[in-house]
């Protein structure tokens, strides 16, 4: 935060020169006259992390580290037949091979010793690329990607700064009139202050430790050797070692946990802190922006900056001469005091040195106190931000609770009204059915024929409605890519159903088109008349 300290000190010096001045204070008040249009807004990202996956990875890494220390291996045997001159040692496999391949003996023994032309030799090599070690390497890569993705997201949100300031002013005073418009937006990623004061600093350190541990394991000689082998891909076969060995079993549990983990492992809530209107002190500081812009525009526009530079240098030279004069007077006074007291200059210098040391000691104590005050101020700022965040959460929860109560009441009223209507309709329906049944007894033959026709029409309408509903469902599935081979639309029965749906749509189109033509004709001829 070095640049912030520099700007803050420079601004404090700037304010120390402009704030006490009466004329400048009046000019700033003109900019502070109507602060309703000001908007100072800062966006905070409240990020909460589910620490279950962090604990699971930390526990799993302990087992992985112990499993790596085991350095599991197997002996690989490579055998070949070499000329007898190149054979350095004979093993049991050599004798067994020679007993089965007598064709290697082409010379009769002269002294009783059988000497073959060639002999089978076995070379045993140690191979660390066993299945279990390859599983450890693949698990480390997967865990690193899993943790790195969440580490980047969490650190990004916890160190992100978004600020905005908007203002619009029209200043009129005597013969002066000025207009000021500011629309400032800023976004800083990986901000040092936000990162240092983040409540997730402890969690971030844990995830960073996980990533460093994984990288350290990947740099071990065993993992570097295994990395040369083909990467193991799912599904993982549970060997006896992965099932029974305590360390490899713990690594297997981590694999299952990561493979079945759902969600991001963290939640982010965007909170906006708005200051509108600004308080008097803050508004006075922002008013300096208008005056500074006015000065720079006037100075560089009129060319008065060169003249102001000359006057500035003259004033600095005057201050320097005045300081040298005061210093000379102090030195002369010091000499007179030495002569008046009759002491030596060295003795007086020692006294001054003791006084300087005492002042330095007091200054160091003062600096420590200032540092302690700054630390307490930072803690108070964090506590205030947390308090503001809790207040905003409580307000949001109250609004949500009120809205939910109102929604439940409205839903209850609508359901009650719907049930009443349904009951009334049911009563009407039962009454009409009773009347229809009574009349049917009086004219049974005619009623049955009419009923048959009505039922046929109802069945036809219901069938058409069903066909149209299924057609709409198929259109919806097609638009969203939900039609699969399991729907059976390409089968004979499915295609016949599609043809029925197509015919129903055509009939509906013709019926609606007739209504539309009548409506168009009535509107056109009606306008002409």
Image (tube, rainbow, N blue to C red):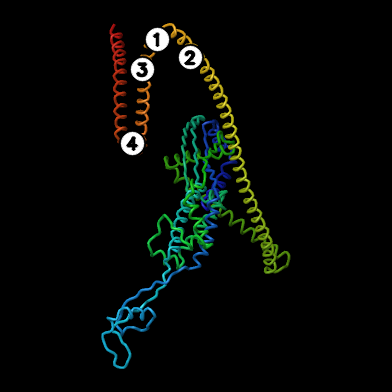
In percent of width and height, residue 288 lies at 53, 40
The residue that label 3 is drawn on is 456
Mark 4 or mark 3, which is nearer to you?
3
Lower position in the chain sequence, tag 4 or tag 3: 3
The residue that label 2 is drawn on is 429
Lower position in the chain sequence, tag 2 or tag 3: 2
Q: Residue furthest left?
A: 106
Q: Residues within 10 Å of mark 3 (few under 14, many from 20)?
A: few
Q: What whole-number distance in Å separates the C-alpha atoms at marks 4 and 3? A: 29 Å
Residue 94's disc is: none
The residue depicted at 54 percent of the width and 43 percent of the height is 46
The residue depicted at 46 percent of the width and 45 percent of the height is 307
Q: Residues within 10 Å of mark 2 (few under 14, many from 20)?
A: few
- Asked which secondary structure carries label 2, the reply is helix
Q: What whole-number distance in Å separates the C-alpha atoms at marks 1 and 3? A: 14 Å
Q: What whole-number distance in Å separates the C-alpha atoms at marks 2 and 3? A: 20 Å
Residue 447's disc is: 1
The residue that label 4 is drawn on is 488
Lower position in the chain sequence, tag 4 or tag 2: 2
Residue 189, can we see it? yes
Check the image and report above or below for 489 versus 443: below
């Amino acid at each position: 935060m070095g640049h912030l300290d520099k700007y803050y000190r420079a601004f404090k010096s700037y304010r120390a020169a402009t704030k006490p001045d009466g004329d400048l204070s009046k000019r700033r008040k003109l900019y502070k006259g109507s602060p309703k249009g000001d908007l100072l807004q800062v966006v905070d990202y409240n990020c909460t992390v589910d620490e279950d996956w962090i604990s699971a990875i930390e526990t799993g890494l302990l087992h992985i580290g112990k499993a790596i220390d085991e350095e599991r291996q197997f002996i690989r045997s490579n055998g070949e037949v070499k000329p007898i001159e190149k054979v350095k040692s004979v093993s049991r496999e050599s004798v067994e091979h020679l007993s089965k391949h007598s064709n290697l003996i082409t010379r009769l023994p002269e002294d009783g010793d059988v000497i073959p032309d060639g002999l089978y030799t076995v070379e045993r090599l140690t191979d660390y690329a066993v299945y279990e070690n390859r599983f450890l390497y693949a698990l480390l890569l997967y865990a690193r990607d899993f943790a790195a993705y969440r580490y980047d997201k969490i650190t990004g949100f916890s160190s992100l700064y978004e600020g905005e300031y908007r203002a619009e002013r029209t200043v009129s005073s005597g013969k002066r009139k000025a207009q000021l418009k500011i629309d400032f937006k800023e976004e800083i990623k990986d901000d040092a202050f936000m990162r240092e004061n983040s409540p997730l600093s402890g969690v971030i350190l844990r995830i960073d430790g996980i990533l460093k541990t994984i990288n350290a394991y990947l740099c071990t000689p065993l993992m570097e050797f295994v990395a040369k082998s083909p990467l193991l891909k799912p599904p993982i076969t549970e060997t006896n070692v992965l099932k029974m060995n305590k360390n490899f079993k713990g690594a297997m549990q981590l694999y299952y946990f990561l493979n079945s983990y759902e969600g991001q492992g963290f939640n982010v809530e965007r909170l906006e802190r708005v200051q509108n209107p600004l308080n008097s002190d803050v508004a006075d500081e922002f008013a300096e922006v208008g005056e500074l812009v006015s000065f720079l525009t006037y100075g560089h526009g009129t060319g008065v900056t060169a003249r102001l530079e000359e006057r500035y240098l003259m004033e600095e030279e005057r201050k320097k001469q005045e300081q040298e004069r005061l210093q000379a007077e102090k030195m002369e006074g010091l000499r007179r005091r030495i002569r008046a007291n009759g002491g030596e200059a060295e003795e007086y210098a020692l006294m001054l040195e003791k006084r300087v040391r005492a002042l330095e000691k007091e200054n160091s104590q003062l600096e420590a106190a200032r540092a302690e005050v700054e630390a307490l101020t930072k803690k108070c700022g964090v506590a205030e931000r947390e308090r503001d965040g809790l207040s905003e959460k409580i307000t949001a929860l109250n609004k949500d609770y009120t809205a939910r109560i109102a929604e439940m009441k409205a839903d209850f009223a609508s359901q009650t009204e719907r049930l009443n209507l349904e009951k009334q309709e049911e009563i009407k329906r039962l009454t009409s059915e009773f009347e229809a049944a009574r009349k049917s007894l009086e004219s049974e033959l005619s009623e049955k024929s009419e009923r048959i026709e009505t039922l046929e029409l109802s069945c036809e309408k219901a069938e058409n409605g069903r066909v149209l509903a299924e057609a709409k469902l198929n259109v919806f599935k097609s638009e969203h890519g939900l039609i699969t081979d399991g729907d059976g639309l390409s089968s004979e029965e499915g295609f016949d159903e599609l043809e029925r749906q197509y015919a129903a749509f055509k009939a509906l189109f013709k019926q609606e088109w007739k209504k539309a033509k009548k409506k168009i004709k009535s509107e056109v001829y009606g306008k002409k008349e």
